[in-house]
Amino acid sequence: MASVQLHGLTKWYGKRLGVENVTLDIADKEFITIFGPAGAGKTTTLSLIAGIVAPNRGSVRIGGRDVDGLEPADRNVAMVFESYALYPQMTVFDNMAFPLRSPKHRKSPQDVEDRVKRCAKVMKIDHLLQRPIQALSNGQRQRTALGRALVRQPDVFLMDEPLSHLDAKLRHSMRAELKEMRSQLGTTTVYVTHDYLEAMSLGDRIAVINQGRIQQVGTPKEVYFMPASLEVAQLFGDPEINVIDAKVASKSGGRPELQILGENVPVGVPSDVVPLLNGAETVKIGLRPSDVDVVEINNKGNFHGLVYSFEPLGTKSVLTIESVDGTRIRALLDGHRVFDVDRRIQFKIDPNAILFFDSERGAFLAKSKLIREEAGDG
Amino acid sequence: MNESVSIFTLVGRVSKTVLLLVYALFALFPLLWMIIMSLKPDSQMFTTTFIFSPTMENYSAVFLRSDYPHFFLNNLLVSISAVLLSLIVGVPAAYALARFHFRLKEDIAFTILSFRFAPEILVILPLFLIYQRTGLYDTYFGLIWVYQLITLPLLIWILRGYFEDISPDIEAAAQLDGYSWWQVFLKVLLPLVKPGLVAASLLCFIFAWNAFTFPLLLSDARAQTSTVVALRFLASDTVHYGQVAAAATISALPEVILALLIQKHLVRGLSFGAVKG
């Protein structure tokens, strides 16, 4: 049980950037997910905490103790690798017993057996203990790898995409199991994933990392509803958030309005957002597909478009609309609605759901308070 | 329909057996011929083929009345030492070439392999002169050293492939499990490359044991090996084919015994893929 502090961690692999200036404070018993696309520096961050690679700059503290320069064996962390990294020449039992037979964590043979068996029971692999690793399925290997990490009591758990090689169904059930298990364990955990659902469902907090830099750290609600940048907004959510270029037309006396999608449909900027735009004339707006609503009744405030594609997904369906100026808008709708391709439709946008971003740098500018308060208590 | 299929399978099986039998004869006949020769008295060497009066005379001439056993032991000593030295140098070298990235890595690896390219006869003259000058001529150490040209590249290149097959994650995992680097190497890595280690060592031993050019020209009465000495039974005045055959039969024994003992590892080791998790 320990807190973890990363301070200014920078790692270059030759000329390739691993991570740059990663600073992160992880509280004792916190479950933090590090989320980002492939090659963002997630695994590098874990390896730096574990001591598998040494940083060019920066420091790592575990439990208040400076661990820079300590060997991985001396840091008392346990790690689950994306490749599982099981010892192929050993049985499941020997794999799980391996940490307990090491010079650092040596236990008596009886103790080793008790712990391995108890842990195997939790992981539901107690009937496989004498099997060689080659005889296991992917899911069983993954459980063995988790078991090997769980069998001793480390200060910190590091998990590197432990679910990514499982098939979709198993992944979802393991995700639920992991969530169940983390509440029993109560150990500080750093969990790396490229799946935003995993990141949001498991983490107390999410650290979003991209191109080697931390973009945002916050609760799942914060990063979803108040993303620090357009980049972060695009990483969360499936289908991806709609990004639309918008002109801010200020009317003398009245509230500014957004001109979007080549139509003369007034979308008022919410009053509490106006001062935060700093008088910008152009902005990028982000609109979650779930905030686009297809309507059947004619209204002055409706946008127009053609159905570009329609994907029914059971309870939900994804509709791609080609708007008047050619921008494609994705909408997430109820599953029971059916649309033919090329049908003319009208849709509506909720101004309070719009995320406002700087048009050049993509930095977050504002979002209407109505939703923000909801996000704040997460 | 069923009948025709079974006829085909039957023909397949029979022809397979026949082919294997032919191959076995082809492979084993020289060995058999050698053993037969070694049991023939000199007088019947050219007059008989399979029917003759067997004698142990050749063996006793080679073993009791010549210094052949001395050279046989020489060969054992030199070959085993050469393999051991190759292991001590080659295992870390193979690991480094597989795991670390450093300048000129591929060039170094290729240079090591290129030691095997040149025929021994090409380098033997300068080596002979150097050995004469430095006093390495006709010493055990001199032979063991020059044998590294034969054994080391082979060992390094086979083991390098094995080390490359092991994911670096496995090493990291073992270190996180509480082991120092040396313990990881001994407890995790070595067991994983064991099939390759055994196969490569055996091959190295066979090549070292069969070496001819180097011991012929770089050693003399003291350090010479049985491969060279066996030919001494073919002097210009007397030609004892029977004794040559007896010496050769004995000389082949260590290889045959070794190969039979570790056949299992040899097949697995050379077919690779043993590490794939």
Image: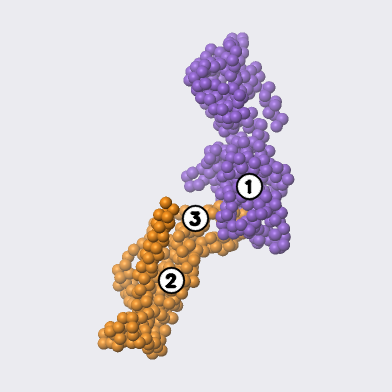
Chain colours: A purple, B orange
Q: Residue placed at 39% from the left, 84% from the top?
A: B68
Q: CA distance from mark 3 to mark 2?
A: 24 Å
Decide if residue A141 is on the left or right side of residue B234.
right
Query: Which residue is at the far top?
Result: A253
Give the crowd class for mark 1: few <14, some 14-19, many >=20 residues within 10 Å. many
Q: Do callouts 1 and 3 point to residues on the same chain?
A: no
Residue A54, compared with residue B156, is above or below; it is: above
C-alpha separation, residue under disc 2 versus residue under disc 1: 46 Å
Residue position for label 3: B165
Label placed on residue B205? 2
From mark 1 to mark 3, how far is it between C-alphas? 25 Å
Classify mark 3: residues with Cα within 10 Å, few (<14), some (14-19) or many (20+): some
Q: On the same chain: label 2 and label 1?
A: no
At 72% across and 47% down in the image, what residue appears? A185
Can you give x and y, in whole percent of width and height, for residue A247 in the image? 53, 18
Give the image quarter of residue B220.
bottom left
Q: Residues within 10 Å of mark 2 (few under 14, many from 20)?
A: many
